[in-house]
Image: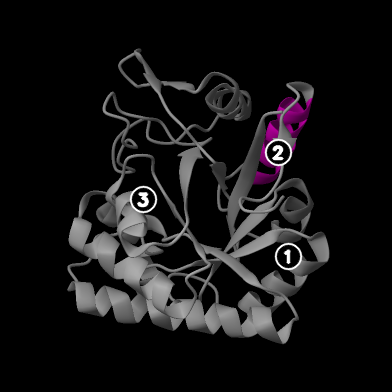
Amino acid sequence: MRRIDLNCDLGEGAGSDEQILPLVTSANVACGVHAGGPGVMRRTVDAAIQAGVAIGAHPGFQDLPNFGRVNIDLSPGDVFELVVYQIGALGGFVTAAGGRLAHVKAHGALYTMAAEDAALADAIARAVKAMDPALILFGLPKSELVRAGARAGIPTATEAFADRTYQRDGTLTPRGEAGALIADVQQAAAQAVRIVTEGKVRATDGTDIEIQADTICLHGDGAHALELAREIRRRMEDAGVTLAPVGRP
């Protein structure tokens, strides 16, 4: 039976988190650095536990004005410290609520930079391993993040995106370029289902590329995030796909 994890970036102030949570299987919770804060983190964690979804830390660059989506030149040592700090902060709220942190997914510019920079990817993987070697590290298929997780000996999960477009080489279209985001709910949901059922995605140049994913992401700050979560879940169930968190039986 086909199965997939459906994850969503939450705790970023979008306002629809509690409605989205019952529709997804994993929540990547902002750690108060690129978005959120102590109160938001606590409430999001509590709601995620109530909904029964897996909880992950979503560490990003310390850049609230730009939502962590602008590249920042940090050393691998600085990235290690930044990621340890954020995993520890969110992990504290998870522990206090009686839950367990399940995974780590870098946010925004940190995610895309580490996908191509082995040194930054290794720093993130080392931070994850230092905090808890059982944590699952999310990353793009064939990216440096996935390779770094393998080098560090920690579990990894390959991630694809419902609401982002792809280049012919399998990378995401940079957010600054036209057409990087898929605003149409039906198109995004169809892309997500095709990734799972066919292992393919249509690149911006019209070619089909192969893609393997353990988890599909939708962005909680998207204008139609709640509608998209509902449509993806409906289509997955209609296609006979089981939605379940990565790593759970």
Q: Nearer the viewer, mark 2 or mark 3?
A: 3
| Residue 2 pos. (x, y %) | 67, 29
Question: By what rule are the colours in the image chosen?
Answer: one colour
Sequence order check: which comes first, mark 3 or mark 1? Answer: 1
Helix, strand or loop under label 2: helix
Q: Is residue 218 above or below residue 42?
A: above
Sequence order check: which comes first, mark 1 or mark 2? Answer: 1
Q: Is residue 181 above or below residue 204?
A: below
Give the Cα distance between marks 3 and 1: 26 Å
Q: Which residue is mark 1?
A: 48
Q: Which residue is mark 3?
A: 146
Q: Which residues are magenta?
A: 225-237
Helix, strand or loop under label 1: helix
Residue drawn at (79%, 52%) of the image: 22
Left or right: 240 as drawn, with respect to 4: right
Residue 107 versus residue 121: which sits nearer the camera? 121
- Are there few (<14), some (14-19), or many (20+) residues within 10 Å of tag 3? many
| Residue 87 pos. (x, y %) | 48, 76
Give the Cα distance between marks 1 and 2: 19 Å
| Residue 209 pos. (x, y %) | 37, 20
- Are there few (<14), some (14-19), or many (20+) residues within 10 Å of tag 1? many
Q: Which residue is mark 2?
A: 227
Left or right: 168 as drawn, with respect to 188: left
| Residue 179 pos. (x, y %) | 37, 30
Residue drawn at (36%, 58%) of the image: 149
Helix, strand or loop under label 3: helix
Kindly report the secondary structure that dominates the magenta region of the rendered protein.
Answer: helix
Q: Residue furthest front?
A: 153
- Type of the residue with mark 1: Ala
